[in-house]
Amino acid sequence: MAAINECDLQSAHNELKLCRICLDNDNASDIISPCLCSGGSAYVHRKCLNDWRSENANGRAFKFCDICQFEYVNETVVNDSEADRKRLLKYHLLVIRDLTLTVLLVQLVIIGLAYLSKIADRNRDNIKHLFPEWMNTFVIYYLSGIILFLALLGIFGLIVLCYGWGHGGGGRHNCDFISNICYRSNSGSKGGMFVIVVAIVLICAFIGIFVGIILSVAILKQSMKRHTNKLWLRQEAEKYIVKDFQERRNELDKYKNNNHIFTKPLTDSDTDNGIA
């Protein structure tokens, strides 16, 4: 009877331990108390905490509790060379996966534009006549999709140019120039309109090449830098294990006095050199 009551008390105690991130008490063996927080914020799943640490919000979350500002104590540092090699391999595979998904997304857009080009050209074959007769139909419309994709990037670049230089007048002149071309194309014959439309698309595609390069270098590099840092921190969170003070809250006193509030955000050099 006493054993049953003890089990009931333990079960009731576990039910009170809710993870402050996922607000659930599943997998009670994974719930820890890593900091000075008390009450409903005292407990957190180790996995949830590692996921949150890998986000590194404000450059602080990896090493510090965002509620009580306590610096986590690393109970165990995994120094297994084989485990490090596997983590590094996993990190590289995740980066390659994201790059592959980005390329596939671009290809999907290009194929979609190629399909729309084929539908628009099914009656007159105007687009097919722009390419050599020996060229395969799929290749023709795939190249058309690439050109249209670059043209969209070029149009995006022109829009940015117009609005970016609007206050100085230079961008407005460029927009007026494009508007005049469109107006003249509307006043011409259908054949002339098609030629002018093709010319505009090619011009925009030419601009789109440079816009695409700039966007690829600027945006992709920045986003991948953030993402790769996150992936790396996710691996580091598994390597540097946060100490659990769940049954030994009294030990927090000796860390409380030596605990310094971290004011400098975590930098890339901290990530590259390892986080102790």
Image (cartoon, helix red, strand yellow):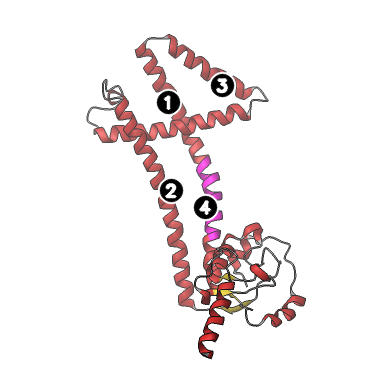
Of residues 192 and 248, the one nearer the viewer is: 248
Answer yes or no: do the residues labelled 3 and 1 have beta carbons within 8 Å? no
Mark drawn on residue 175? 3
- Near mark 1 (Cα within 10 A), the count class, few <14, some 14-19 or many ≥20, is many
Frontmost of labels 2 and 1 is 2
| Direction from residue 135 to residue 253 in the image, left or right | right
- Near mark 4 (Cα within 10 A), the count class, few <14, some 14-19 or many ≥20, is some
Label 2 – label 3 distance at C-alpha: 32 Å
Quarter of the C terminus within the rendering? bottom right
Q: Residue furthest right?
A: 257
State the image coordinates of residue 273 (x, y, percent, origin top left). Answer: 60, 68
Q: Secondary structure at mark 4?
A: helix
Q: Which of the marked residues, 3 or 1, is nearer the chain's N terminus?
A: 3
State the image coordinates of residue 1 (x, y, percent, origin top left). Answer: 51, 90
Q: Which of the marked residues, 2 or 4, is nearer the chain's N terminus?
A: 2
State the image coordinates of residue 231 (x, y, percent, origin top left). Answer: 51, 61
| Direction from residue 276 to residue 198 in the image, left or right | left
Label 2 – label 1 distance at C-alpha: 25 Å
State the image coordinates of residue 171 (x, y, percent, origin top left). Answer: 61, 24
Q: Give the overall secondary structure of the magenta segment.
A: helix
Label 2 – label 4 distance at C-alpha: 11 Å
> Which residue type does callout 3 highlight?
Cys
Q: Residue furthest front?
A: 1
Q: Secondary structure at mark 2?
A: helix
Q: Which of the marked residues, 2 or 3, is nearer the chain's N terminus?
A: 2
Q: Which residue is mark 2?
A: 102
Vertical comparison of 110 with 19: above or below: above
> Which residue type does callout 1 highlight?
Val
Q: Which residue is mark 1?
A: 201
Q: Which residue is mark 4?
A: 224
Answer yes or no: do the residues labelled 2 and 1 have beta carbons within 8 Å? no
Label 1 – label 4 distance at C-alpha: 31 Å
